[in-house]
Amino acid sequence: MKRVNIFAFILILSAALLGCAPDLVVKDLDVTWNTANKKAKAEIANTGNKDAGKFMVYFNADEDPVSPNHIPQVSFNIPGLAKGASLTLIANFAPLAHPDNNNLANVYKITALVDPKDMVKESNENNNVKEVLLSPRMACVGFGPPPVAGTRYGSPAGNVPGDIVLLANGIKMSVHDFRWIGGGGTFNVARIEMPPPILFGTGQTINTNNINLEFDFSGIGFPVSKVELQYLDLGGLENFSVNGQPVPIYAGEFSAAPSPIAGVNVSVTSNPVPGGKTGTLVLTGAVQKLTIGGQEFWIDNVCAKE
């Protein structure tokens, strides 16, 4: 009888000791992921009934494909966390953008992990992770800086048609001949600059003057189902092509471009401004390449979305 009581006491004591432990959890995870900001904010709490000693917190920007040398991760060393207490951590991924990781264009998910090194013995080891999917994935060309205002592409810069002149977030931009409605064409200049004093764009834009720009989305790491951009048209005609169609290229008034082109739906909005019009272009469908240009024609914020 006495032996049974001792055994029961050991079981009760063991259960009490196991229950007296920290329990570190990721209570909340908020992600802001756009051209201007790439941040994750997490609330880390100790919901156990014992203080936690030092531990680490990882914020991982999960990629597809995974970059070979610059995997984006932000880590924090936490000296300890009292029972019932919580803290807020903010991870800024923007400084980790690098050509090796496609300037973070391949990131599709943010994961917060508390105590990834198992430095704290917890009552529950299965509640240390929280994830947020970035949907849809997006890659944009915003025209800087960089490059600096005044940068020119095309004939004055010594380029020839077909030259790749800019790579941003996995999107390649090349320069091409501008086509006239009646045939033939020219190869002039595109320039990075602030737009005219009209409500258009965000910061620097690119002005096309009798030259076409081709945007190649094949290297951004995800299938593109939508492309959007802003435009400002202050005169002359425009050129437009999707995935190499039509052949040689549509030339005329931008707002009158045909739809669909190569199976991609084309939507153009247009609003009057002094001397011209401004609006947005939205392509919906499988877009690999977009060619666009004009005579007094600015574009900004070319964004490809999953």
Image (cartoon, rainbow, N blue to C red):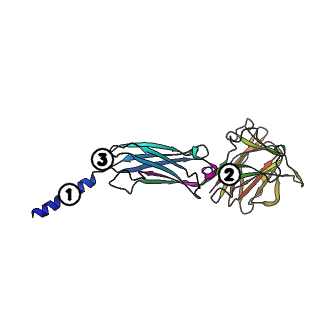
Which label is found at residue 136?
none
Which of the two marks, 3 or 2, is nearer to us in this view? 3
Secondary structure under badge 1? helix
- Which range of residues does the magenta coloring cover? 97-122
Q: Give the residue at x 55% y 50%.
A: 72
Sequence order check, earlier mark of 1 and 3: 1
What amino acid type should be assigned to the residue bearing mark 2?
Glu
Is residue 236 placed above or below 197 in the rendered structure?
below
Sequence-wise first label, 3 or 2: 3
Return the disc, 1 or 2, that comes first in the chain's sequence.
1
Neighbour class for label 2 at 10 Å: few (<14), some, many (≥20)? some
Residue 228's tag is 2
Q: Which mark is residue 50?
A: 3
Image coordinates for residue 282, horizontal then vertical, percent: 69, 53
Cα distance between the residues tagged 1 and 2: 65 Å
Verify whether residue 106 appears in magenta.
yes
Residue 244 % position (x, y): 77, 60
Q: Is residue 100 located in the magenta-colored stretch of the structure?
A: yes
The reply to whether discs 1 and 2 touch (Cβ–Cβ < 8 Å) is: no
Along the viewing direction, whichever of 236 and 290 lies nearer the viewer: 290
User: Please, what secondary structure does the residue beneath circle 2 have?
Assistant: strand
What residue type is disc 3 on? Lys
Label 1 is placed on what type of residue? Ile
Q: Which residue is mark 1?
A: 12
In front of the other: 47 or 182: 47
Residue 246 in which image quadrant: bottom right
Q: Position of residue 90 (x, y in %)?
A: 49, 43
